[in-house]
Amino acid sequence: MKNVKFASVLIGTVLGIAAGTFAYIPETLATEQAQQRREGRDANQAAKQDARSTKVDCRAENNKSNAECRQDKRDTKQEGRQEKREIKY
């Protein structure tokens, strides 16, 4: 009788530890993914702001046409998107 009680307590303990371990893993992954998304958004927002500044500076210098300034802005935003991809993947 003592062996049966001991075995059931042992099995219950092992199952409890296993369940706790598996419950912790998805939380860790979710936190890591959230951090990556946050860093990606920050990189993207910084790229947008840099692109705006690039276009304003370009237009203020009057060295290029508006179309060329727009292309510079697009290039800056594309660089930010690439940085975001590198963070996420």
Image (cartoon, rainbow, N blue to C red):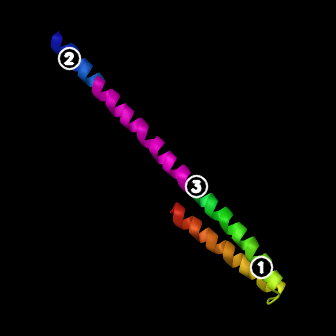
* Front position in the image: 88 or 6: 88
Q: Residue at x 26, y 19 (%)?
A: 9
Q: What span is colored magenta in the figure?
A: 13-37
Callout 2: helix, strand or loop?
Answer: helix
**Dot placed on the residue nearer the N-terminal end, 2 or 1:** 2
Type of amino acid under label 3: Arg
Q: Specify whether residue 18 is painted magenta.
A: yes
Q: Which mark is residue 37?
A: 3
Mark whose residue sits in front, 1 or 3: 1
Residue 63 at x, y percent in the picture:
80, 90
Q: Residue at x 63, y 58 (%)?
A: 41
Q: Secondary structure of the magenta portion, mostly?
A: helix
Residue 16, relative to residue 39: is it above or below?
Answer: above
What is the distance, in whole Å, between disc 1 and disc 3 at their CAs? 30 Å
Residue 86 at x, y percent in the picture:
53, 67
**Dot placed on the residue nearer the N-terminal end, 1 or 3:** 3
Q: How busy is the neighbourhood of tag 3: few (under 14 within 10 Å), some, or many (20 plus)?
A: some
Q: Which residue is mark 2?
A: 6
Q: Which residue is mark 1?
A: 57
Residue 21, relative to residue 13: is it above or below?
Answer: below
Q: Residue at x 38, y 32 (%)?
A: 20
* Front position in the image: 18 or 87: 87
Q: Looking at the image, do the residues carrying marks 1 and 3 touch, with CB atoms under 8 Å apart?
A: no
34 with respect to 73 (left or right): left
